[in-house]
Amino acid sequence: MSSQANTQVAPNCCDVAPEKVATPLTREREVEPRYHTRRVDEHTWQLGVVLPGVKRDDIEISLEENELEVVAHRRHNVPENWRPVQTERPVPTVYRLELTLAIDVDPERISAKLENGILTLNLPVAESAKPRRISVE
């Protein structure tokens, strides 16, 4: 019997490139962000959307009829010369919120502001949706 066995030598742990140690199964995860609504006054509603780690330039807001959509991309803020070996949890990279508004809003007067990870949308009620007094002749 031969004393030589068919063995493979495991590579030295230091010979493996850091990005090859662990490979994620998914590249991107889409998450519906938390949000809240409140009435500012009789002419304006406000929508607050929680978007941690998102920059202003990475947010897209669209309104088609009464369908409001907010899409935000969270970029990984890792220094260029630093490569993590492994992260414990995948960080959500795309936030998507799709809402059907129960009110008609004036799309020309909608405003948006991002501060401390909270996107605030002011949604002015459209003139056509405001209550009117009708006189009787």
Image (cartoon, rainbow, N blue to C red):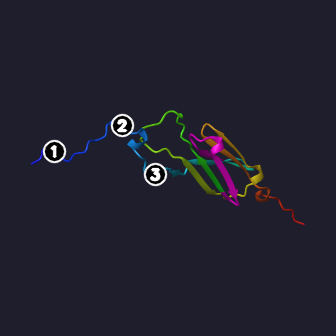
Label 1 belongs to which residue?
A: 4
Q: Looking at the picture, does residue 83 appear above or below residue 58?
A: above
Q: Amino acid at mark 2?
A: Asp
Residue displayed at 87% across by 65% down: 136
Left or right of 126 on screen, residue 12: left
- In magenta, the rendered stretch is 47-67
The label nearer to you, 1 versus 2, is 1
Could you tell me how far apart the alpha carbons at marks 3 and 1 are, in whole angstroms?
42 Å
First in residue order: circle 3 vs circle 1:
1
The residue under label 3 is 26
Q: Tell me the crowding category of disc 3: few under 14, some 14 to 19, or many 20 or more residues within 10 angstroms, Cα based.
A: few
Residue 112 picture location, percent across and down = 69, 45
Residue furthest right in the image: 137
Q: Which residue is mark 2?
A: 15
Tell me where residue 49 appears, x and y as whole percent: 61, 46
Q: Kindly identify the residue that appears in the image at 48 percent across and 50 percent down.
A: 27
- Amino acid residing under circle 3: Thr
Q: Is residue 60 magenta?
A: yes
Measure how far apart labels 3 and 2 are at the Cα level: 25 Å
